[in-house]
Amino acid sequence: MSKELTTRAEDYSKWYNDLVVKADLADHSAVRGCMVIKPHGYAIWENIQQTLDKMFKDTGHVNAYFPLFIPKSLFEAEEKNAEGFAKECAVVTHYRLKTNPNDKTKLIVDPDAKLEEELIVRPTSEAIIWNTYKGWIQSYRDLPLLINQWANVVRWEMRTRLFLRTAEFLWQEGHTAHATKEEAITETKQMLDVYADFVENWMAVPVVKGVKTANERFAGADDTYCIEALMQDGKALQAGTSHFLGQNFAKAFDVKFVTKENKQEYVWATSWGVSTRLMGALIMSHSDDNGLVIPPKLAPNQVVIVPIYKGDEGLAKVSEVALQIKAKLNAKGISVKYDNRDTQRPGWKFAEYELKGVPVRIAIGERDLANGTVEVARRDTLTKETVSIEGIDVLIEKLLVDIQSNLFERAKQRTQDLTTKVNSYEEFKKVLDEKTGFVLAHWDGTPETEEKIKEETKATIRCIPLNNEQEAGTCIYSGKPSTQRVLFARAY
Amino acid sequence: MSKELTTRAEDYSKWYNDLVVKADLADHSAVRGCMVIKPHGYAIWENIQQTLDKMFKDTGHVNAYFPLFIPKSLFEAEEKNAEGFAKECAVVTHYRLKTNPNDKTKLIVDPDAKLEEELIVRPTSEAIIWNTYKGWIQSYRDLPLLINQWANVVRWEMRTRLFLRTAEFLWQEGHTAHATKEEAITETKQMLDVYADFVENWMAVPVVKGVKTANERFAGADDTYCIEALMQDGKALQAGTSHFLGQNFAKAFDVKFVTKENKQEYVWATSWGVSTRLMGALIMSHSDDNGLVIPPKLAPNQVVIVPIYKGDEGLAKVSEVALQIKAKLNAKGISVKYDNRDTQRPGWKFAEYELKGVPVRIAIGERDLANGTVEVARRDTLTKETVSIEGIDVLIEKLLVDIQSNLFERAKQRTQDLTTKVNSYEEFKKVLDEKTGFVLAHWDGTPETEEKIKEETKATIRCIPLNNEQEAGTCIYSGKPSTQRVLFARAY
């Protein structure tokens, strides 16, 4: 398979798909809409998981695991939530196969093994979790309950794209229960901050924090907070959501607690999640026509060392120095791969690690040894320099910090450049079509206008930014008065 | 809910279930046969996962993720495997619900959303993985492929028990592909050794390594290696399996590679797995009538410190010392919980941490402060002693090592005591009924005899131990000649 990618200018969408498959991140599978996450992609996801998991634990959360299946009667208990997911869920109806009487090598669904009640493969777990919480919460002493789950979920999407929209995806879902509304809202916002911190400071992707309009809210939530990021092609991507669920699920599942004052009250809830979709955000924020670019903090290998040599003796000499450098870097907590395979040539390896996004590449040739130097190439800028082996560990350590910050600054600059204030609908449409990106515009606050704009332009309100500047204006669509601009974009 | 457990003598099975629920390890759910893994249970599982994951990576494996669903046509490709799992699998037949026209608050399966091909919820992933490997393996350069997956699987068990047998469970499944038969067999045995190492040295559960008879083999394997452990009640529990799959899946999915000599050959395969069932083995090996006993190496909290005090001032004084001790222990890499909650009394906390299995409890009273001492209680022996605060970090560190080794030695002694050689069928049945445990007996090597013995006594051949002593004898059932004893037991 050729390692050449379609360029972004040629076809952005094809570039993305090429990159995901060729950089060994993910692959299509034999199951409609489901992906295989390949080892290199999964290693990045593991780093994402481990970092977030620590952040969740540092904020007092614990992990648990709830069933994959939700009985239909529980699924339908919270009406809005059920309505929101009913059209895209996988339904288990039978629990046995049997041999096809007409062809002994084939199996058929055994009609005698029909379930009395169908099971829904979880598209999200509020229903099964709140049904469980009912048994766990009696008194204010049992609150707050701060639980997270790492799991797979299924939403039967009709148009799928690797990482961005797949029928099955991996995610974490936090589900917390609180004694007061204020505490639940504080939790909702805290987790939004955790997400923003992670996405900006680990993934190097700048985000806008905001709250969704009623139209875009999670089915069953009173408020949905989100972080929105802008991709290289000027389209927005929702990178995480944190929902204030009010007492909706507590009421649907009858979860009450006895307060300190000995009164019965419904419990307040939040839920929050990020998914393998983050992989899409990471890829589309930083990568280029040569392949993936991984921020150092999430790279499975931060440094790769490639030896350039002739014959076994040459390799032995180079390896000695390479392994010394590796040991020094390891001692600083830097992950290093030394690729001394003799089945591939250095040029092939250079291209391979560029494609796979390793942040720093060190090449060591036999000539370098005499000079006490190596060649260091950084993936983000594709620049190379010859540096002294002396003190290389300090240099690389600093370089990784530089790359991490450069990626963030670059993405931030791009997001700023692609954020435009407009004052008319004409201008709005022109920016969307010609410049793309985030568009800040006045909106009259009605779902009808939002819907019309979406129909006509495919742009949605990504969020009402938090701490939004208040400013008198008129809705670009209806001309009605408005007190603030909201953030529009075409989105993934 | 009362924290009192049924005793083991009274009803071992009820004791187990009580313990699992009351020690907050797991709970029954609204979904038939599916469990909720509660935070305390999940924290132990996370430690199991992390330890094993590192062992897998240290032996050259990487993680990946494959789809939850397997199209029926792939599922049935490897005939024996399909036959083995067809009778207990959850089948997705539809991808949408719709509002019930007769009751707008209810949902029904939308008959228009029937899948063209049914999807099986994976009971194990050989089929989907080998179908994927077909695209990944062309040449000997692509081999070996050493991949592991952490995932949930579903097997529609009719009689379920928390952790031991549930419809959905969590596990890891390794799936490797090799160029030669020898290499695949070496891998199969290596992973069996990894499992034995983990179960003995982390879980403190002694195991017998062996190979399954044809009757007990994994459906689709040429050979199944296993580790078998003996529980306190004298029943065996299969703690892990490692399968040599031969070329069965390569042939079923047509996975060939070009050898160095430029010939086309089928790939050789292994698969190996352990599951949340290990939690059951851990619980039933070490726990007592007071509750759970966790081996220190897997305990989420290795030490709990409980303050005993009067009033805020008393708490402040005790806390100062408690936190110093905590810091010292943390510095040695020991995990410590300081429980200064004022909502519960010390006696309640003692019982709680005994129930939850924390290996070491330190109690600090105001009087202790003057003496420079604390009370240290170990969970495994339920003994207490008063020790000096001076040097307590070294003492606790050593104590944790002692507890880990004591648990293993205790379980090993029990396993030895409950392993009996018998020479007649009468003796065999008597031991099974009266003494219980592992029974070593001669068997004629036929599936028929094995089946008869199972029917009549409910005992199965757990394994033919590796490096088994060769010894001439006669089958206890048929009287036919036999060259070695095999390991029988009634099992979970």
Image (cartoon, coloured by chain):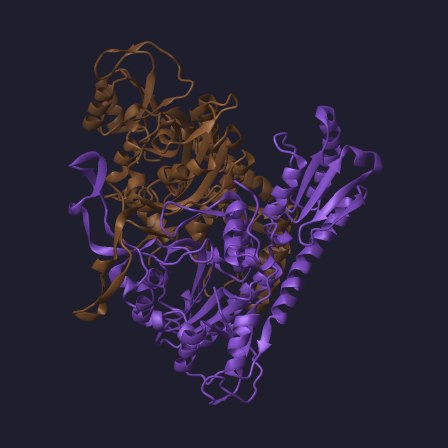
Chain colours: A purple, B brown
Q: Which residue is drawn at 21% across and 15% down?
A: B478
Counting from the top left corner in percent of width and height, residue A478 is at 45, 87
Q: Which residue is drawn at 46% across and 50% down?
A: B43
Counting from the top left corner in percent of width and height, residue A109 is at 21, 45
B63 relative to A252, above or below: above
Regarding residue B32, the answer to whether it shows in the image is no
The quadrant where residue B454 appears: top left
Counting from the top left corner in percent of width and height, residue B425 is at 22, 19
Residue that lies at the very extreme toward the right in this rendered image: A371
Viewer-side residue, B311 vs A470? A470
Q: In the figure, is residue A178 to the left or right of B439?
A: right
Counting from the top left corner in percent of width and height, residue B186 is at 47, 24
Q: Which residue is drawn at 39% across and 74% down?
A: A259
Image label count: 0
B437 relative to A347, above or below: above
Regarding residue B176, the answer to whether it shows in the image is yes
